[in-house]
Image (cartoon, grey):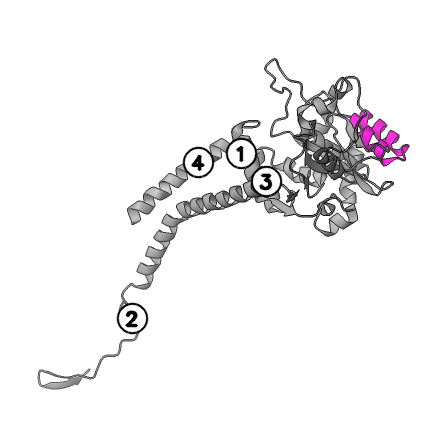
Amino acid sequence: MRRFLQYLFVLFLALDFAALIVLFQKIEGTKLSIALIDIRNALITKFVSQGSELEAPPAELFKHGFLTDSPEERATWKEILNNTVRYHDLFQQLDQTPSTVEKAKLIALSFSRNGSPVDADGKPTSMYSNYADLLFKISTIMEPRGCCSDHAQVFVALANVVGVDAMVVTCAHTTCAFYCPELKKWVWIDPEFALLAKRPNGEYMSSLEVRDANLKGASFDYDFFGTPQHDFAKMDPRSQEYYRPETFCPEFGVEWGNNELIRNKYDHRFLFLPKAIRQSFEIAFGLRPIYHYLDDAPALVAKSFRIRMASYAVGLLFLVGNLAFPIYCLVVWLMRRFSRSAVPGSAHVVLPEIALESQGHNLVV
């Protein structure tokens, strides 16, 4: 048994070392990266049955654990960004803009440039590495560069700085929603491609309303507000992969928090660590929001359950493989320690009274 557990322990130490090597490699955009994202999402996803739970007013969401930045954190970031010419001008313009929808457009246009261009093989270039923090993205994303999740992160952060509640939405690709007090609703926005959506009567639509309209084939219009350099200035969004009605958003979820500023504060301290490790710490300490998905996508629910169960099984296997031999050694040591024979002087030994004769003397012991 000892030899078997010893071999098992060495095997799992080797597997631990191999896992660390993988985590420290540049795997962004690979199949392994996608698999790790699926595992992460499955482990930190909550399913809800009512869409209204995901689009309640901000005050209601905050009561149910929706993470957000403090006013002090927002003020600190506004002071930092206000010292740059570009954001000083943006903040002045936003102060003179009463409409929340128009503010959201200005925020998106302050950096939106379609994201990373692609090379001759169709692969995106100018992507951010795992070690790019929020401030670096805010400073450079208008080059253009970054993917949809980078644009969503920057939009939510800048919206927070100027007091507009926003959140990340997983629908089509990674997009956003911002709360419009004038309309008393969340309004969907794609900050990467400069899109909003409107009903035929001109009313701006929420993320769920856009999704339902696509699923039901209802009439609505995409409201492009970008520049001539944006993709959708020259093409209909519905002709693009993300926005085809038949494939638009079969799964709908929101990130349960918009605390990008405070999250970056802690993330920045550990930029030397791989993104997966940093995110694991953020989840463990309650800094990273979990995802809330609608449970009306059976395939997603089943997939999430399978991945979660498999992850628990692998985690348990690694736990047993790493701890079985040390625990075995500890148990053996404790058994030997407490079963050791008593030594003289260590305990009072009672012997029966025995009469002995020794050289004519009676001794009683």
Which amino acid type is shown beneath numbered disc 3? Leu
Secondary structure beneath label 2: loop
277 or 115: nearer the viewer: 115
Write down the residue under mark 1. Answer: 35
Secondary structure beneath label 4: helix
Which amino acid type is shown beneath numbered disc 2? Gly
Of badges 4 and 1, the one in the foreground is 1
Closer to the chain start, of discs 2 and 4, is 4
Instruction: Give the alpha-carbon distance from disc 2 to disc 3, as whole Å.
Output: 70 Å
Q: Which residues are magenta?
A: 83-110
Local packing at callout 1 (Cα closer than 10 Å; few below 14, some 14-19, many 20+) is few
Q: Looking at the picture, how far across and down is residue 297, in whole percent? A: 62, 41
Write down the residue under mark 2. Answer: 345
Q: Looking at the picture, how far across and down is residue 210, in whole percent? A: 75, 35
Magenta-colored stretch includes residue 43? no
Instruction: Give the alpha-carbon distance from disc 2 to disc 4, as whole Å.
Output: 50 Å
Question: From where the camera sits, is residue 235 visible?
Answer: yes
Question: In the image, which disc is placed on residue 300?
Answer: 3
Closer to the chain start, of discs 4 and 1, is 4
Q: Quadrant of the C terminus?
A: bottom left
Extreme-top residue of the structure? 120
Closer to the chain start, of discs 3 and 1, is 1
Of badges 4 and 3, the one in the foreground is 3
Secondary structure beneath label 1: helix
Q: Are marks 4 and 3 in contact (CB under 8 Å)?
A: no
Toward which corner of the image does residue 157 lie, by quadrant?
A: top right
